[in-house]
Image: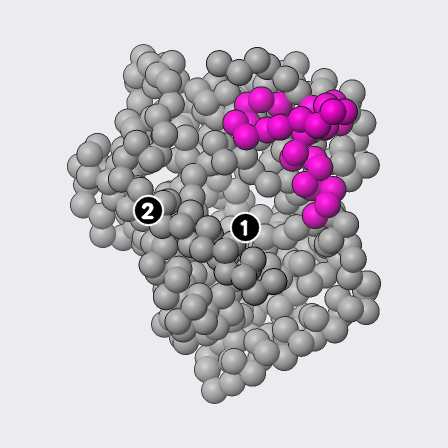
Amino acid sequence: MKEYRICTRCVMDTSADDITFDENGYCNYCTDFINQLELFHSDSESELEKKREYLIKKVKKDGQNKPYDCIVGVSGGVDSSYVLYLTKQYGLRPLAVHLDNGWNSELATHNISNLCNKLGVDLYTHVIDWEENRDMQLSFFAANVIDIELLMDNAMAALNYNQSKKYNLKYMLSGTNSATEGMRMPYNWNHYKYDKKNILSIHKKFGKVKIETHPLFSTWDFLWNRYIINHKWISFLDYFVYNKAAALKILQKEVDYKPYPYKHYESVFTRFYQGYILPHKFNVDKRRLHLSTLIIAGQMAREEALKHFNSSPYADPAQEKQDKEFVMKKLGFTEERFEKYIKTPGVSHEYYGSEKWLMNLLVYINGIRKKIIK
Ligand SMILES: [Zn+2]
C-alpha cells in the first residue's frame, strides 16, 4: 500500500490513485486545475457574448418547424434550473426532461414543476419502476462496486438522447460547467458513465427483476449520436460568467425557487451515498475535490479546509442517522446486512463485464490523430 500523503497547496491526498507530487509537494490535481482556469478565463466578456449568440442562433435554427428547439435535463438543482431559466431569457423553446428513480425529495419535485409552470415550459418526466430500480441498485451493492450513481447518470444520458431522437433535436443543454465544478474526478472515485455492458453484466449476476423501464446508454449509442447524427451535449453555463450564488438569488426572485437546506437535497440517496457510503466503504471523501477547488479559487484558506476533515461529511449527526434508516428501509437492508456491506472491500467495476476498454481505445486513437494533424 502507498504511503499516505496530502498536497501542500490543496487538500487532495493519496485516496486519489493517480495523484503525483512535484518538488514543492503540489499535486497534479491542483496544478492541472490552475492551467484549466487560465484557459477558461481567457475569453473576454465580449468574446463570450459572441460565442453565446452564435450558439443560440444555431439552436433556434435547428428547432425551426419542430415543437421544441432543444432538450434541457432538469434535476431540481440550481445549475440545471438556471439553464432552463436562461433558455427562456434567450427566446428558446426547450423541452425539460426529468428522471424519477424514486429518490427525489419532495422539495425537488416541487421546484421542478413550479419552475416549468412559471416559465411555461413543457416537462417530460420518465418514471423508472421502483422495484426495478431497487433491484438494480441492490445488484450494485452486491457487486461491491464504487459507482452506484452510474445507474442514475447512465439513465439520465439515455433519457436525454431518447428525447432528442424523438423530436430530432440536435442540442441538449446541460448544467455542467467548468466554473463551479472545478477539479477533475480521480479515476478510482467513480466509473465510466456510458458503460451499459457493466450495468447489464452486474445485474445479470445479482439482479432478479427484469429491466423494462430503466433506460440504458452505451458507448455505441454515444458514438452514433455524437458522430453519425450529430446530437450533442452543450455545457450551456460555460457560455456565461456563471456564479452559482447569484443564479440562486435570481431563481428565488423570478420563479419562486426554494433553496435546499443541505447539499444534494434533490436526492436522499445521493446525499447518503456521498456522505456515508463513499467515505466509510471506499475511503473516498468528495469534499476534498470541492474544498480544493475553493482553495485554488482563493475562496478558502487551506487551514480552514483541513478542519472539515475532523468531522463527518454530515454536518448534523441526527440527519445522518435519519438518512441511514430511510435508505436501509427503502432498499430493504437489515442493520446487520448493511454493516457487513460497509465492511466488505470494494471490487473494481472492470472485474465484471465492461466496455470501458472501448472508450479508452477511442481516446487513445484520438490522441494519435491529434499528434498526426499537428
Ligand atoms: Zn494539490
Q: What's the magenta bit mostly, secondary-structure-wise?
A: loop
Front position in the image: 343 or 40? 40
Examine the rendered structure and indicate whether residue 314 appears above or below residue 250. above
Q: Residues within 10 Å of mark 1 (few under 14, many from 20)?
A: many
Would you say residue 33 sits in the magenta stretch? yes
Is residue 217 in sight in this rendering? Answer: no
Q: Secondary structure at mark 1?
A: loop
Look at 81% across and 36% down and name the residue there: 298
Amino acid type at circle 1 is: Gly
Look at 73% across and 53% down and name the residue there: 39
Would you say residue 326 sits in the magenta stretch? no
Q: Is residue 64 left or right of residue 316?
A: left
Front position in the image: 81 or 150? 150
Look at 42% across and 44% down and name the residue there: 192
Q: How many marks?
A: 2
Front position in the image: 23 or 15? 23
Q: Is residue 35 left or right of residue 116?
A: right
**Range drawn in magenta:** 7-36
**Mark 1 or 2, nearer chain start:** 1
Q: Secondary structure at mark 2?
A: loop
Q: Is residue 339 left or right of residue 113?
A: left
What is the spatial separation of the Cα atoms under label 1 and label 2, in whole angstroms? 31 Å
Q: Mark 1 highlights which residue?
A: 76
Q: Position of residue 96 (x, y in %)?
A: 49, 63
Amino acid type at circle 2 is: Glu
Q: Mark 2 highlights which residue?
A: 355
Look at 52% across and 42% down and name the residue there: 266
Q: Is residue 135 left or right of residue 73?
A: left
